Amino acid sequence: MLLGQKLFRIAGLHDSHLVYDLAEEYDAEIVEVDMDLFDVIDEYRLLWMLVHHGIVMLAIFALPKVVATFQWVPIPVLVPSVFVAAAVLIFGAFATGTMAARDMRMAYDVKEYSEENPVEDALLVIGALHRAGVKKRLQDSTQVQIA
């Protein structure tokens, strides 16, 4: 398990516990439909590089201004705070930039699975931000009907 996954689980932001609880309760099969984070980074490495280096450079150049503005904040607190904020911005910008591709991949995986395996009822557990994109891509499918 990655450190980020552990932090999400501790903060209650990870939905895997929901998936496993439902699978156990209904004796259901779990099928992964989202792309792995490292696969997404590999596939969109140019976007990752631009976002990562752009925000880190912005943080470095903005640091003197931030320090001058917040002189009352001790440097040992301020510097890590700026870099944590940069990390959140990096991940947020990258996730936003790859959202449509991930939605398309999820819809494709659902369609493919439904064509290969006859399933009467299924439950798709995805993040709220993916719902509209996946639903839009699955609305024309003859195999998948969204309730």
Image: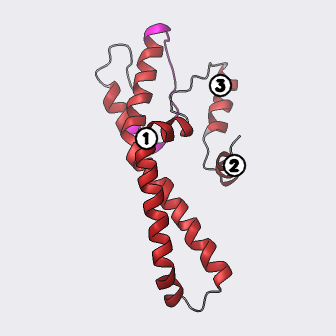
Q: Name the front one of labels 1 and 2.
A: 1
Which residue type carries mark 3?
Ala
Mark 2 vs mark 3: which is more N-terminal? Answer: 2
Callout 1 touching callout 2 (CB < 8 Å): no
Query: Count the marks: how many?
Result: 3
Q: Nearer the viewer, residue 63 or 133?
A: 63
Q: Residue at x 36, y 31 (%)?
A: 135
The quarter of the rendered structure image containing the N terminus is: top right
Q: Which residues are magenta?
A: 115-131
Which residue type carries mark 1?
Tyr
* Category of crowding for the residue at label 2, using alpha-carbon neighbours closer than 10 angstroms: few (below 14), some (14–19), many (at least 20): few
Mark 2 = which residue? Answer: 3
Instruction: Give the structural element (helix, strand or loop) at label 1.
Output: loop
Q: Residue furthest left?
A: 140
Residue 99 visible, this angle: yes
Q: Which mark is residue 85?
A: none
Mark 3 vs mark 1: which is more N-terminal? Answer: 3
Q: Nearer the viewer, residue 2 or 8?
A: 2
Which residue type carries mark 2?
Leu
Mark 1 = which residue? Answer: 44
Residue 17 image offset from top left, x and y in percent: 67, 38
Q: Name the front one of labels 3 and 1.
A: 1
Residue 147 visible, this angle: no
